[in-house]
Amino acid sequence: MPPITFMSPGGFHSFEHRWALAAAFAFQEQIGFQRVAARIRELNTRCKQQLAKVPGVKIATPMAEELSAGIICFDVDGKPPEAVVKALEAKQIVASVTPLFYVPLHARLAPSLLTDEADVDRAVAAVAEVTRS
């Protein structure tokens, strides 16, 4: 078997990410998984509630915490998800589009343990600007 098959489909391994895993798990164990989950739920609930107030935004992710996790799917009237994500990127907001096998596609935001209320507010304000452009 040629050595290249061990690296298939090619490229470099994500060593930095792999090396960081032990520290990341230790950090979450120190905080407590329940507290991490609660914080992510809190930030995502804040984001969903604020996005729901923006005219022209439709949230696809359920508001109910038991039906929702750490990713918020949403649409902006008259704009394809790719355009929404690109416009947010220009405002230094990290967003993504659902995978191509999702039908329909949606823009996505994912407040996490590394974000805070101000980050959520800034992201929602940027989405509001995108609806007006």
Image (tube, grey):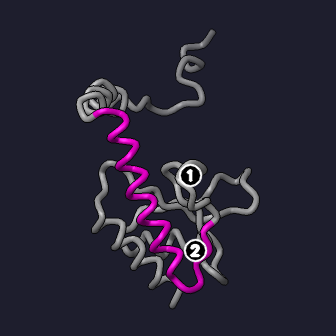
> Which residue position holds label 1?
68
Find residue 1 and report its image quarter.
Answer: top right
Residue 48 in the image: state x and y as whole percent: 49, 66
Image vertical order of residue 49 relative to residue 37, above or below: below
Res. 116 in view = yes
Residue type pointed to by label 2 = Ala
- Which residue range is magenta in the image? 32-59
Residue 104 painted magenta: no
> Which residue position holds label 2?
83
Kindly identify the residue that appears in the image at 44 percent across and 58 percent down: 44
Q: Residues within 10 Å of mark 2 (few under 14, many from 20)?
A: some
- Numbered mark located on residue 49 in the image: none
Kindly identify the residue that appears in the image at 48 percent across and 61 percent down: 109
Residue 33 painted magenta: yes
Q: Nearer the viewer, mark 1 or mark 2?
A: 1
Q: Is residue 90 left or right of residue 51?
A: left
Image vertical order of residue 69 relative to residue 23, above or below: below
Image vertical order of residue 83 relative to residue 103, above or below: below
Distance, label 1 to label 2, CA atoms, is 25 Å
Residue 14 in the image: state x and y as whole percent: 40, 32
Kindly identify the residue that appears in the image at 43 percent across and 29 percent down: 13
Residue 132 in the image: state x and y as whole percent: 51, 90
Q: Residues within 10 Å of mark 1 (few under 14, many from 20)?
A: some
- Name the main secondary structure of what is drawn in magenta: helix
